[in-house]
């Protein structure tokens, strides 16, 4: 074993654990409650520096951030009910966001202190790493409208691949990033995404020529990429 490998293993042993799980068909409200409970447990012990990573695929839902307007929900109650889509208010920043089957949503419950921008960048970098692994080369993070955007092209709307929305309390982050993997396009017609009517939401499957692996595989890849950037040791539970 060389010195670099030994040093890497030593760092790994002392890195704070990030306990991760993946679950499908998740109710947004129940998942938000679980996040808040994990945050409260972490906040109750100032000596703890571990974290919890919820990787989920939600049932259809529209979530309103603190700047969200009900006017940006474009479907009637009957249309929402037809696809089983519920509307939730959330403590995160931002406006209205879709959560739906075919989307990977990542919620790291971790201490960020005042390093909120650094945490946002880590969310974006992990997402870009997964997208690039499957051949997407024309995507980048933008802070003004936090998320992953494709490079502008003449005569077509701006396209967004992932959206970021956070809430930080007592130095601990909840909520996270929604990464479109293979979402039914018609569902994006239910809302003005992120308050931007001129923007087109796009899925990873539309951008690559190869068949994507199961969502659980992508979730594990995302978790590994985020933990590495956060300097944490990923533990699956």
Image: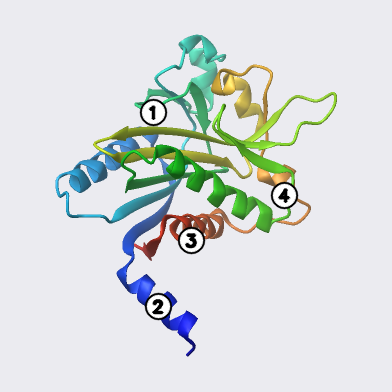
Element class at badge 4? loop
Q: Which residue is mark 3?
A: 224
Quick one: label 1 or label 2, which is nearer the N terminus? 2
Residue at horizontal 34%, vertical 38%?
Answer: 114
Residue 5, label in figure: none
Q: For marks 4 and 1, give the CA distance.
A: 28 Å
Element class at badge 1? loop
Mark 4 surroundings: few (<14), some (14-19) or many (≥20) residues within 10 A: some
Q: Which residue is mark 4?
A: 136
Q: For marks 1 and 2, give the CA distance.
A: 36 Å
Element class at badge 3? helix
Labels in figure, total: 4
Q: Which residue is mark 1?
A: 92
Element class at badge 2? helix
Compared with residue 126, is residue 61 higher up or lower down, i.e. above or below? above
The residue closer to the viewer here, 223 or 62, is 223
Residue that sits furthest to the left in the current view = 44
Residue 66, percent from left and from top: 39, 19
Q: Nearer the viewer, mark 1 or mark 2?
A: 2
Q: Is residue 85 visible?
A: yes
Q: Is residue 155 left or right of residue 4?
A: right
Q: For marks 3 and 1, give the CA distance.
A: 24 Å
Residue 9, label in figure: 2
Mark 3 surroundings: few (<14), some (14-19) or many (≥20) residues within 10 A: some
Task: Identify the colour scheme used.
Answer: rainbow
The residue closer to the viewer here, 129 or 22, is 129
Compared with residue 67, is residue 202 higher up or lower down, i.e. above or below? below
């Amino acid at each position: 074993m060389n010195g670099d490998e030994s040093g890497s293993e030593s760092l790994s042993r002392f890195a704070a654990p990030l306990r991760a799980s993946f679950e499908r068909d998740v109710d947004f409200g129940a998942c938000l409650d679980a996040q808040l409970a994990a945050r409260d447990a972490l906040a109750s012990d100032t000596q703890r520096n571990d974290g919890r990573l919820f990787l989920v695929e939600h049932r259809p839902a529209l979530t309103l951030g603190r700047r969200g307007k009900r006017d940006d929900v474009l479907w009637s109650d009957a249309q929402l009910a037809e696809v089983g889509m519920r509307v939730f208010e959330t403590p995160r920043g931002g406006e209205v966001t879709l959560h739906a089957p075919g989307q990977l949503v990542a919620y790291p419950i971790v201490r960020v202190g005042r390093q909120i921008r650094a945490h946002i960048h880590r969310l974006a970098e992990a997402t870009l790493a997964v997208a690039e692994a499957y051949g997407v080369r024309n995507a980048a993070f933008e802070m003004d409208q936090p998320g992953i955007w494709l490079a502008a092209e003449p005569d077509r709307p701006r396209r967004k691949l992932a959206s970021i929305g956070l809430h930080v309390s007592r130095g601990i982050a909840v909520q996270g990033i929604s990464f479109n993997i293979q979402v039914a396009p018609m569902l994006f017609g239910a809302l003005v995404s992120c308050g931007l009517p001129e923007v087109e939401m796009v899925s990873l499957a539309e951008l690559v020529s190869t068949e994507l692996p199961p969502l659980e595989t992508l979730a594990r890849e995302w978790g590994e990429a985020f933990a590495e950037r956060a300097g944490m040791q990923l533990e699956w539970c």
